[in-house]
Amino acid sequence: MQETSNSPLYSDDKIDIRELVNILWKGKIIIVFLTGFVSLITVIYSLQLPNIFESRVLLAPVNPSSGISRTLKGYSSLAGIAGVTIPVGIDESNTSKAIKKINSLSFFETNILTNIHLPDLMAVKAWDSKTNTIVFNEDLFDTNSNTWVRDYSYPQKQIPSAQESFKVFTKQHLNLSEDKKSGFITLAIKHQSPYLAKQWVELIVNEINNFYRQKDKLESEKAANYLNKQLSLASLSEVKEILAKLLQEETKKLTLIEANKFYVFEYIDPPAVMEEKSEPKRAFICVLGAIFGGMLSIILVFIRHYFFSTRTS
């Protein structure tokens, strides 16, 4: 009795599967045509996408003066006992602040935008690999007159502003990440020109190093001037001795600031002009297009079959 009761259900399942297969077989022309059409459109679309090259570097944090900073803080506490307040110039770690600084509008406007050709960021159409030249979109930037001719609406301006350029730079070109375990920083720039991608990576590293070098240099010079002033005013020999040691350490600190080329970050793996593109993944895009076309055609076949079946019945 149990086998008899289960047999119809099993047969119904087989009939349902055969019916579905039969529906798909009847609609095979639609499936083949629509899948092929969508695949063709996807191929044409992927071929229209420009090649993007990515220059990537691995950076390690540099803290050239951490030992001296700790020494200064120790002497500063002694000077405080003597009634003298000593400003400490260099922060023990500029790394976390530097990562935030690179992603800031102020750094882009002051240190990046002033050192690049704006059309290379905002009006690129293609890159000619044979001549290593950028082809600009003439609807945006007229190369003959070297002027911006793009259509715009508020809040945009004829010449792209720093804020508009910053959004394009951070969303389409810049990629910055930090490995919390190792402390290494990965900095990458994407661009149609592999040469510009490499140049912009080097520009960012150089500018962030120079920014904090100059910042700490000014603070250290102020501290040295302050110590010299206090040394000339001090009367107690113990206070003069402490101030002299502090001034000596501050001088060492200034020497380190000037001597270190890589002040905040140094290269573990320097940038290179990449020979192979990083995107687009044309094969992947075409496969996705074929899958989408196949699924769309199957759904259309089922809708067509059941819709007309219902209408007929």
Image (cartoon, rainbow, N blue to C red):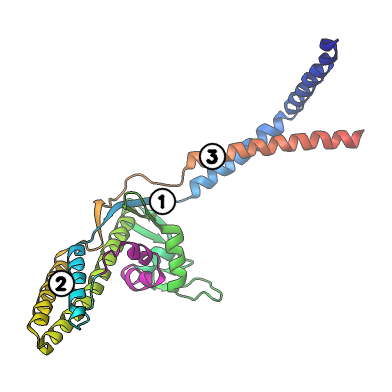
Number of other residues with Cα within 10 Å of mark 3, as a class: few under 14, some 14 to 19, many 20 or more: many
Q: Give the side of residue 133 with respect to residue 36, left or right.
A: left
Q: Are marks 1 and 3 in contact (CB under 8 Å)?
A: no
In the depicted structure, whether residue 109 falls above or below residue 53: below
Amino acid marked by disc 3: Cys
Magenta extent: 91-116
Magenta highlight on residue 110: yes
- Between 76 and 23, which is closer to the camera in this rendering? 76
Residue 212 falls in image quadrant:
bottom left
Q: Which residue is mark 1?
A: 52
Q: Can you see residue 212? A: yes
Q: Position of residue 235 (x, y in %)?
A: 9, 88
Name the residue at 20% across, 81% down.
Answer: 222
Name the residue at 75% across, 23% down.
Answer: 17
Query: Which disc number belongs to residue 254?
Result: 2
Viewer-nearest of labels 1 and 2? 2
Amino acid marked by disc 1: Ile
Q: Main secondary structure of the magenta part?
A: helix
Can you name the residue that lies furthest to the right here?
Answer: 313
